[in-house]
Image (spheres, rainbow, N blue to C red):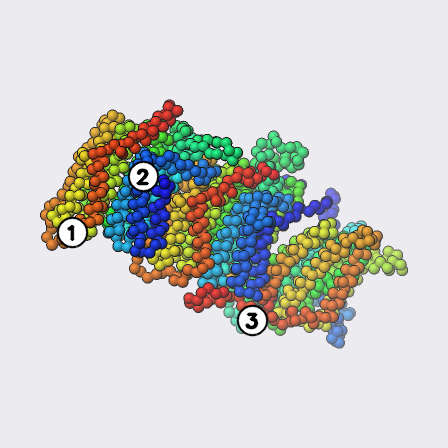
Amino acid sequence: MPDWLAAGLITLLKAVLVILGLLTGFAYMTLVERKLLGRFQMRPGPNRVGPFALLQPVADAIKSIFKEDINVTMADKLVYTIAPIISVTFALLAFGGIPAGPAGSLFGENPWVYNLDAGILILLAMTSMGIYGIFLGGWASGSKYPLLGGLRSSAQMISYELGMGMSLLGVLMMVGSTRMTDIVQYQAVNGWFIFFQAFAFILFLISAFAETNRAPFDLPEAEQELVAGFLTEYSAIKWALYQMAEYISMFTASAFMTTMFFGGWKGPVFLEGFIPGISDWPLVWFIAKMAFFIFFFIWVKASILRIRYDQLMRFGWKVMLPFALFNTMLVAAYIAFVGRTEWKGGTVYERFGLNQSLGWWALGLISLGLAAFMIVRSDVFRPWFNKTAPVRSRTPQVPQTGRAGGD
Amino acid sequence: MVGTGAYVALSGVLFALGMIGVLTRRTAIMVFLSVELMLNAANLALVAFARAWGDLVGQTAVFIVMTLAAAEVAIGLAIIVAIFRKRETTNVDDLAQLKG
Amino acid sequence: MMHFMIFLPLLAALLVMVVPNKWREEVAIGSTLLTLGLGLAIWLSGGTGAYVRDWVAPLGITYSVQLNGVSLIFAVITAFMTFIAALYAVKRIPNPGTMLGLILAMETGLLGIFASRDLVLFYVFFEWALIPALMMLAIYGGPSRMKALVKFAAFTLFGSLLMLLSIIGVKYYSGADTFALYGFDVRLADGTLRHLSGLTERVVPQPVQNWLFLGFLLAMAVKLPLWPLHAWLPDFHEQNHPSGVPDVMGTLYKVGGYGLFIFAMPLFPNAMHDFRPVLMGLAAFTALYAAWIAFSQQNWKRLLAYAGLSHMGFVALGIFSLNETAIIGAMYLLAFQNLYTGALFLSVGMLQERIGSVDTRVGGVMTQAGAMGGLTMALWFASIAVPGLAGFIGEFSVLLGAYQVQPWITAVAALTVIAAAAYALTAFQTTFWQARPLGAVATRDLHGLEWFVLGLPLALAIFFGVYTLPALNLIQPAVQNVLGLAARALGGNP
Amino acid sequence: MLVASLGIGIIAVIASALLGPKKGTRAKLMPYESGNDPEHGGVGTGQRFPVHFYLVAMLFIVFDIETAFFYPLAAAYQKLPQFAFFEALTFVILLLVGYYYILKKGVLEWR
Amino acid sequence: MTYTLPDVNFLPLMPILFVLLGAIVSTVGGFNTSRRNVTWFNIAMLVLAGLSMTSLLGFGLWNRDLSAFNGGVRADNVALMIGGVIVLGSIMSLLVSLDTAWRARVSFPEFDAMLMYAITGCLLIAFSGDLIVMLIGLEIMSLAGYVLATLQDSRRSEESGLKYFLLGSAGSAILIYGIAFLYGATGSFNYAGIAGRVAEVLNPATVNAAADAATTVALAPNNMGILVAGALLILAGFSFKVALAPFHQWTPDVYSGAPTSISLFLSTVVKVAAFAGMLRVFSGALVDAPAWHSVLQWLIAATLIIGNMAAYFQTNFKRLMAYSAIAHTGFLAMCLLAQPSAGGPALVYYLLTYTLMSGVAFAIIAALQRNESGLSIGDMRGLFYRHPAYAVALAICLASLAGLPPFAGFFGKYLAFQAAFQNGYQWLTVLAAITSVISLVYYLRPAMLMFMPDRTPAREYAHGQRPPTNATVLLGVLGVILLGLIPSLWYNFAANPGIWRLLAGIGQ
């Protein structure tokens, strides 16, 4: 068997594995979420199907497959069918690029499906492809609420994508590469980025919530205003596919945050003291961190109220974007000046003699301070997005007859 | 490794398709999409040639062309939307206010 | 002095536009008179030397002017006729400010045409004179002037743009440094003299020369005019203001013959030699054809237009024959036909003023306006080349010279003399003699200024009909000079 | 990966299409408009929505391209001389001019 | 790999930066002050830009032949002269817009902003030393132009904007594709580099083996084909921009549909800039590339015939001017057929005169029209007796457009004819002469109608004459007359063959 075929087959195998894992994960996450929400709200949650309702997801799956799949008369059949597929496909695709462990740690194979040196760009691209699924779905339903819902959610997602993309720039500048494995390695050497880029992390976290249409940003499914948003006309498996996409993108987001800010698959190095090599156990740390973030998602959903749509948009454009931009320029300035300033003979780095990372701590402090400021003194910029500013009228004043040229 | 000629040929095909679209399609949106197709054909050609010459200038050019395309999209959509909201059509033939 | 003479009218024109209404006449008349005086002074001083300056140095375009020989005569006569026309305009046209201004502006163009010794400069003046002519037609013209106007302009431009091309070509193919006819020396920065060759010092090779000549000929044939490019002429004259003032200027503007003589002959001798039979035939046909058409005209202005066309046929015949006598005659004719043709237009204007039409069949004017009839008659005689009047000298020597070259064609042309007598006398007879229709308004006879306006040109016509020496003294050497240049070019390129 | 993930979606849809019951009634297949009959017919026919969404889309296009310009810069930033910072600064300032404009124009206001 | 900075030097960009500053200020400051102030500020900026291109001020760029960014931007005298023309036309359109924009309902700061951005693009084209820079400038110009054409909230202008946009963007797409091919054939975007490589392609003997011989060989077989294809594609793209037939269809609709003060801008400044690009590319980079001359001459012939013929049948003066713009494109493009040393000065001279002439014509239309559809020729009858000054000015400009001496238009035409004639395109010049007779007729009709007295009540806007417009008209007419009487005023600057040798990239 020629090795290109072997490689191909192995990749395919890994892909199937990842997908199956994600699907099961999704299935049981629904269960976990419902149980947790139950706990949060002091009620038992699902407990009928099987021990600890362990079979609940299976039941759901079977139900949604055997349920009648309604095609609305006014829908554009083809697009109406394709939209959920697109959505789930790219959600799954996005995950494949994330390294779950060091090279060759997965039975001699690399624990990722593909690893491009433009990894982050690819991942962002994939996640934004999800918008197509949602918008097309809403549009193809040929009905009012889905249309508006689709528009809303796509507008929301693209708006927050800017903040998302820009908040990562700081990390990229520090690493100097967009390949995820490099980033993880860099963190392994220099420490996690959460310490240097807390501010960026917060921005990214918020954007991630918005990207995944989770609470408090789950406007697309705002029952009060839009029935079920773009999902209104969907039922049965298609509806399930959308849910799948949402949860999977949640996984992806968690994994991404893990990779970018929390050192990826590497465990905290100081534990080496107790158990040697613990920080290199493949998958374990990775899954643990992911689990934490997923729990975080659910937690937030349970505790924070949904915000108004206009607030949402204004927040995205007036807060996220400028802050992200500011953070970027901050890092840039830091690298350009502090990193290169002559200080007691030699640049700061050389002065400290160590690797560059020591140069980062000051930046980390600044960033942390900003984050703290953003959280603590949030009332400073709340007015930016919480009340509508007066709008200047666009059309010019056309003077009445004969008057000499005014404006 | 595929030869430069193949890429250029492909880009030529794309370009021709776009040209045909511009000439035959009657909806503003479609004409516009064809133009975008032409632009991307140009991008493909640029990248292919850049590889053939082994320098990066061509690829930076691609970046710029992409930006231009984006700007054109923004403005073009604005114009088309403005017209669409005035009269429920974007059919080029219906724009007969100005007789040639 | 020369430049002053050329540009004085333009300044006067601008002045006329600005000075208060009541002084306009005085300014205009004074300036025309002054111009005429300058012209006469130059004549007495026997012409001026060439004056050359760079205009657009990188392109070899120069401002080179000279008033001597033929040019001088034309200039003086132009000044004179402009003076007459201005006089009559002042008398005839109410509030003539604009008209006077245009006349003066046009005079500058005409004088420039005659004075310029540089092809591009010539072209510039040539086109410049067109604009006031058009304006006169547009402002003072008759009901269907737009058609006439477009016709006039289109014909002129069609010719002159092709001429522009051949101008470009002449310099390009002859490899001369400048567009000036005669070369000149310039003092360079380092003080050394450098000779810039003029067009006449180089020879354009054949067959290019033929093509360039055709381009040049087109423009000139339009301005001569020569059949079949004469179509604009009758409409132009017919639609112009009934007082023949603009027509006078239009007559003066028929500079085709001059252009051919001064530029084409030295620059394209071979081409002219090759085309001689054709062109002579064309000229003779023009003369005869025009006379024939004139015979059937019932509108004085059209009649005069065709009469002028017929004269131009003679002029062209003389020039194309490349024979010294004929050319001298042609120049003589071309110069002095301005006098009586212009005067005739003015007399038509007077007629129209009196009886309100330019129809040739109002009878019996003679009975009430004898003097006008008499003067008109005399002018007609001049026009149909009755011996003792200026017209005769020209036509006779043209025929004489042309006969030595192309007997038969000349014989055909000679018939024109008879035809001319026919149309002139018929028209005159049906207008002035015959029975006065009943109930027609009484027509005043000439008085004061009008005597002057018709009499002066007539007097000159008679003078130069009898005593040709002063004119010939100017014309003959010029013609010989040009022929000499042509011969040298022929020799340089056998 | 693409193959597999596409496969999942398609298989699922087909499966349910095969297995699921098909009992469509008019009312059931009608677009949901809180029980009212829909006014207009189907996709693309006069579905008007606020122009504001177009604006957001355009802004996104433009700003996203700007971000796209940032990525290569960021990736190469440490290797670049200090001048790169001023380049980036100029870029951002120009960006902010546009941002200020849309801000004052009230494009970002939702009512 | 090591990153080397390009030679960063903002001095050559100074005029552009002035204009850009104006643009930004009018973008940002439009909220705080009135549009009138913004416009005056922009005019001041334009004047500054113009001065900075002369040698009057200490920091003037004239004759310094600066270049920066690895030859990407070149402020040689050619660029400066064309830039001067651009600035002049822009000042004219801004002045006119001061009076007429409020009537056209486009009097808000965005108008100025867009105009200034467009001017920035135009200048960038003129200053470009590099296909990429040229492309960027072209796009800035075009995009701003689309917006300008659509700015007025009326069906006419939106329609014209859409047409302009669709055809224009198609044109730029073709242009970009051509640029890609040119890059493929020569491996360089720099004009000088391209010129040098073209020579190599033409006679491969001179190819120095050292310089990436491998790639040269790799491309050698189709090198020539790609080169020609690229040249022709670029030609087509530019033909869209300057409205050479058969790519001219958008022109009349856009020029007559857009608000008049914008038509002024589009028909003068934008065209000038596009020609600057053509000059740079064809007379500079591709000067000895094969095949494009012969195609261009046919395009010109078609343009001359179509433009003049169509203009002849127009009844609306604004639309007539639009077609005459097409016709003049033909005359202007004749200059490109010549060698740079002959055609370049001709083009520069003609561009200036053309800007002045049609600038005045459009200014007067803008001042006197009742609505944005312009004046019908019939309505101009007797204008001389209602607005004598405007009538005379318009007559002078029409005569100049028709190419009658002693006005500047004559020398422009003369130079164009000479340029084409001396490069063996005699038949084209003859055609041009004949077509310009037609042009004379259709220019003459309105010009003469204005002087014909008539009794009908005036049909134009009564209060048209305002100081800024008068200033524009005066500027234009004086320019036309002076340049006609003393062409050396402007021509002598352009006539120096040295600057054109640089343009051809030989000086590098």
Q: Residue at x 15, y 51 (%)?
A: C443
The chain carrying label 3 is D
The chain carrying label 2 is C
Report the front residue among C347 and E84: C347
C-alpha distance separating marks 1 and 3: 100 Å
- Amino acid at dot 3: Glu
Q: Give the vertical position of E505 relative to C480 (above or below).
A: below
Mark 1 — residue?
C444
C-alpha distance separating marks 1 and 2: 38 Å
Question: How many numbered discs, if any?
Answer: 3
- Amino acid at dot 1: Arg
Residue neighbourhood size for the residue with mark 1, other residues' Cα within 10 Å, grouped as few (<14), some (14–19), many (≥20): some
Q: Is label 1 in a helix, a strand or a loop?
A: loop
- Asked where in the image residue B2 lies, by quadrant, the reply is top right
The reply to whether dot 3 and dot 2 touch (C-beta < 8 Å) is no
What mark, if any, has residue C41 been given in the picture? 2
The reply to whether dot 1 and dot 3 touch (C-beta < 8 Å) is no
- Asked where in the image residue A274 lies, by quadrant, the reply is bottom right
The C terminus of chain E sits in image quarter: top right
Residue B56 at x, y percent in the picture: 66, 45
